[in-house]
Amino acid sequence: MADEKKKILVVDDERDIVNLITDFLEGLDFQVVSASDGEKALQIAIAEKPDLITMDIMMSNKDGYETCLLLKENAATSQIPIIVLTGRNSEQAALAAESFGADYYLSKPFSLEELASVINHLIS
């Protein structure tokens, strides 16, 4: 029986970013689900139990910091690694992401190869 594909939840309110990451990850044989805001991300994460989440910070409804914190506080989702992908390129933003429970921080623009490397490290 073939191994089941690892599932990644991509959360970003920019559809172009979601499409770019989705196409890239599907090409690497991951299953990808997506959400456009924090509220939908919470619902999908609880229902789908992804192996990893990539998340933007600046989104409507619930921002990435609040969503990350809520995911890490929920017993059903607390062990899912979260990579924050954001246009906020500062040490302060990276420290904030870490304080809200993010496992890794990448600033936009980021390299898809670097993203793949981080994902493989976190879910191997």
Image (cartoon, rainbow, N blue to C red):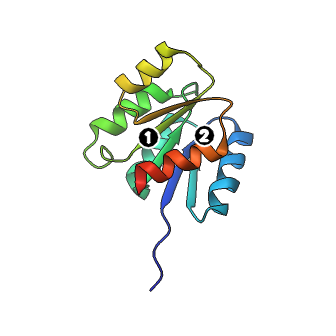
Q: Position of residue 18 (x, y in %)?
A: 66, 44
Q: How many marks overall?
A: 2
Q: Position of residue 110 (x, y in %)?
A: 65, 34
Q: Is residue 86 left or right of residue 74?
A: right
| Dot 1 alpha-carbon crowd within 10 angstroms: few under 14, some 14 to 19, many 20 or more | many
Closer mark to the observer between disc 1 and disc 2: 1
Q: Residue furthest right?
A: 16
> Which residue matches tag 1?
82
State the CA–CA distance, disc 1 to disc 2. Answer: 16 Å
> Which residue matches tag 2?
36
Identified at 46% across, 73% down, the residue is 4
Q: Position of residue 90 (x, y in %)?
A: 55, 15
* Relative depth, front residue between 111 and 13: 111
Asked whether disc 1 touches disc 2, contact meaning CB atoms under 8 Å apart, the reply is: no
Q: Residue furthest left?
A: 75
The mark nearer the N terminus, 1 or 2, is 2
Q: Secondary structure at mark 1?
A: strand
| Dot 2 alpha-carbon crowd within 10 angstroms: few under 14, some 14 to 19, many 20 or more | some
Identified at 59% across, 66% down, the residue is 29
Q: Position of residue 74 (x, y in %)?
A: 28, 41
Amino acid under label 2? Answer: Ser
